[in-house]
Image (cartoon, rainbow, N blue to C red):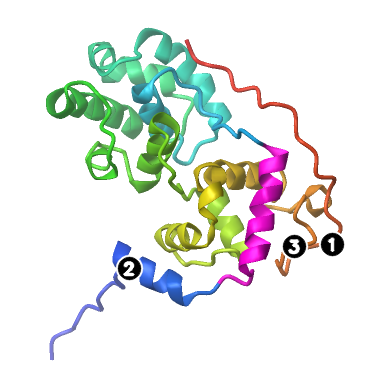
Amino acid sequence: MKNVKPKSPKQPSKSNAVRLARRQRSVYNVAEVEEIFRRFSVQRPEPRGELEHVNPFTLVVAVALSAQATDAGVNKATRALFAVADTPQKMLALGEEKVRDYIKTIGLYRNKAKNVIALSEKLIADFGGEVPRTREELVTLPGVGRKTANVVLSMAFGQPTIAVDTHIFRIANRIRLAPGRTPDEVEAHLSRVIPEAYLYHAHHWLILHGRYVCKARRPECERCVIADLCKSPEKTCDIPAPLVELPPQVVPVAG
């Protein structure tokens, strides 16, 4: 009798992720979700991403480099890189070895340097050196997945997208706003429950909330403006923090 190798479980397709998201219910009603994002909008009227960039190309590169790295770490490495290579043509002329030297403080820098050169080549060959404006085209670039594409569409081209990074994935499940087993499921669920009026900024509100308040190791519930609405089993406080506008973010621009 032949040994039959067990099949690896299939990852859900995007259409399956949408169907699964519809089956997994948020524990919040419509009014509660509206109030959550209303408070975020009062706290940060104009949230911004924290990756430094000067144009869509440098944004693509910065987001691709940020995988398994902090924004602060990426910014530190790319300031000097973008000063000398802020277009695909200049990046290609710089070459993989020199790109490696600029980004060697970032995790997985060798593979990321290869991708930066490869995506620069593809942008020149297939898109006339311009960053494409559709998700379908963006994900054809080396090192660019759905999350990176969504960030670029939002930050560079003003499209309302939900890019599910580790912060958003954690929060969506932790507070039970949009539970899902995969980033695609969470994205589909969030896109369904977030009020349209708040959809454009929702991505950054959730990331910043996860980065500075609802932290991975220990959520700082005493600093949370939605503590009374939150339905997380991990919650340690029911009294919301004062709802005041935070000081404007200081996000330096590379160059």
- Dot 3: what SS? loop
- Dot 1: what SS? loop
| Labelled pair 3, 1 in contact (Cβ < 8 Å) | no
Separation (CA) of disc 3 from disc 1: 8 Å
Residue at 69% from the left image edge and 56% from the top image edge: 35
Neighbor class of circle 3 (other Cα within 10 Å; few <14, some 14-19, many 20+) is some
Mark 3 or mark 1, whichever is nearer to me: 3
Q: On the rendered structure, is 116 left or right of 4?
A: right
Name above or below for residue 78 compared with residue 139.
Answer: above
Residue at 80% from the left image edge and 44% from the top image edge: 243
Separation (CA) of disc 2 from disc 1: 36 Å
Q: On the rendered structure, is 211 left or right of 54?
A: right
Neighbor class of circle 2 (other Cα within 10 Å; few <14, some 14-19, many 20+) is some
Q: Nearer the viewer, residue 71 or 224?
A: 224
Mark 2 or mark 3, whichever is nearer to me: 3
Q: Decide which of tag 2 and tag 1 comes sooner along the chain.
A: 2
Q: Nearer the viewer, residue 130 or 33?
A: 33
Image coordinates for residue 246, horizontal then vertical, percent: 75, 33
Name above or below for residue 121 compared with residue 7.
Answer: above
What residue is shown with label 2? 12
Visible in this render: residue 145? yes
Q: Nearer the viewer, residue 71 or 180?
A: 180
Image coordinates for residue 25, horizontal then vertical, percent: 54, 74
- What residue occupies the far bottom of the structure in this picture? 1
Per the picture, the main secondary structure of the magenta-coloured stretch is helix
Amino acid type of the residue that numbered disc 1 sits on in the rendered structure: Asp
Image coordinates for residue 104, horizontal then vertical, percent: 43, 24
Amino acid type of the residue that numbered disc 3 sits on in the rendered structure: Leu
Q: Nearer the viewer, residue 102 or 155?
A: 155
Label at residue 229: 3
What residue is shown with label 1? 238
Magenta highlight range = 26-44
